[in-house]
Amino acid sequence: MASEQMKSVASALLVLNLCMYVIVLAIGSWAMNRAIDRGFIIGPGYELPAHFSPIFFPMGNAATGFFVTFSLIAGVVGVASAIVGLNHTRFWNSDSIPSAASTAAIAWTLTLLAMGFASKEIELSIRNARLRTMEAFMIILSATQLLYIAVIYGASSSRRT
């Protein structure tokens, strides 16, 4: 009985995380595309600006490039983690726990890294609404992904006893 309740909680968290990671990927892809389109144009006869950075984003501050890059990486790994997690909830046995837990832990650590850059970006100010949305999602995802990992481990320990 308790295992079935944990399964429904894990499924709900997975769907929530999957939706949020997809939204993070969409906003991050927009930011990356805009940075590529409106970045520095260096041609013949031009010199690099004094503070040139290959991770230049015209819509944010100095932390935006790092935040967007690591958010995209965390988003891709998070989507992969959700797919593996949905497979785990489908079978819900001890054979599928290691893969679900390990990908969830990797996605969570990458999400924490992106959340750290989000915190720095919040501290530096000067960002648009889409970036603020992405920051909020990364902060929320760091908590929900950890909660998902706790549910997986809680369900696995309750099945052993």
Image (spheres, helix red, strand yellow):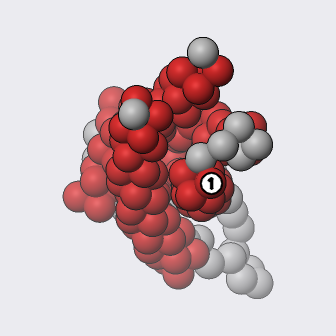
- In the image, what residue occupies the spot 56% across and 58% down? 90
Foreground: 154 or 82?
154
Nearest the camera: 58 or 119? 119
**Residue that appears at 40% across and 57% down:** 15
Q: Residues within 10 Å of mark 1 (few under 14, many from 20)?
A: few
Q: Is residue 130 above or below residue 65?
A: below
Q: Position of residue 30 (x, y in %)?
A: 44, 73
Side of 12 where 95 appears, left or right: right
| Residue 144 visible to an observer of this rendering | no
- Image quarter where the C terminus lies is top right
- Where residue 133 appears, as percent x and y from the top left, is 28, 53
Instruction: Using residue 104 as the reference point, say whether residue 59 is left or right of it.
Output: left
Instruction: Using the image as rendered, state which of residue 137 and residue 151 is in the foreground.
Output: 151
- Name the residue type under label 1: Phe
Most distant residue in the left direction: 129
| Rendered position, 119 above or below 10 | above
Is residue 94 toward the left or the right of residue 8 in the image? right
- At x 54%, y 40%, the residue is 111
In the depicted structure, whether residue 83 falls above or below residue 126: below
Residue 29 in sight here: yes
Q: Position of residue 109 (x, y in %)?
A: 61, 33
From the image, which quarter does the N terminus lie in?
Answer: top left
Residues 82 and 56: in front is 82
Q: Which quadrant holds residue 7?
A: top left
Residue at the disc numbered 1: 91
Judged from this view, the residue extending furthest toward the top is 161
Q: Secondary structure at mark 1?
A: helix
Across and down, in percent, residue 80 comes to 64, 59
